[in-house]
Amino acid sequence: MDAGKLRDRIVIKRLTNSADGYGGFTSSTSTVATVWAKLMFTEGEIDMQNSKRVLNKGIELILRKNTATDNIQKGDLLYPERDNNEYRINQILEMDLYYFKVTGNRTA
């Protein structure tokens, strides 16, 4: 794969909990990395949620290994620049010495 195919900007965020001072927690997201990737949309599954049929769209990313991608974990959130949806990472695979393959599904 040549680096010219990594054309999509992806922001990767992680959910964090912090104490609110009253014995509870507040959750927020913090940015883990912003990377260039090859973004491909995969066929989604139709699921039943609240007695309605919902299309769960999936994505597949190919990204280059570097220090930023070493911190990516299963369950992190993906925000593609050309899409207004939020995706959750389901799987991270090593393709070869230089690239990762990340798959995820749309959340809500």
Image (cartoon, grey):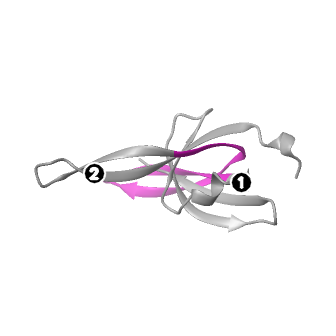
Q: Position of residue 10 (x, y in %)?
A: 62, 41
Give the number of the disc on residue 90.
none
SS for tag 1?
A: loop
Does the magenta segment cover residue 35?
Answer: yes
Residue sitting at 53 percent across and 54 percent down?
105
Residue 101 to residue 108: above or below: below
Highlighted magenta segment, given as a residue range: 32-60
Look at the magenta stretch and give its main secondary structure. Answer: strand
Q: Nearer the viewer, residue 7 or 59?
A: 7
Residue position marked by numbered label 2 in the rendering: 18
Residue position marked by numbered label 1 in the rendering: 66
Circle 1 Cα neighbour tier, 10 Å, few/some/many (<14 / 14–19 / ≥20): few
Residue sitting at 86 percent across and 40 percent down?
4
Tell me which amino acid carries mark 1: Asn
Tell me which amino acid carries mark 2: Ser
Q: Earlier in the sequence, mark 1 or mark 2?
A: 2
What is the tally of numbered marks visible in this picture?
2
Q: Position of residue 73 (x, y in %)?
A: 54, 61
Residue sitting at 72 percent across and 52 percent down?
63
Q: Is residue 93 left or right of residue 23?
A: right
Does the magenta segment cover residue 7?
Answer: no
Tell me the quarter of the picture where residue 37 sits: top right
SS for tag 2?
A: strand
Q: Nearer the viewer, residue 78 or 25?
A: 25
Q: Position of residue 65 (x, y in %)?
A: 73, 56
Distance from the alpha carbon under mark 1 to that under mark 2? 29 Å
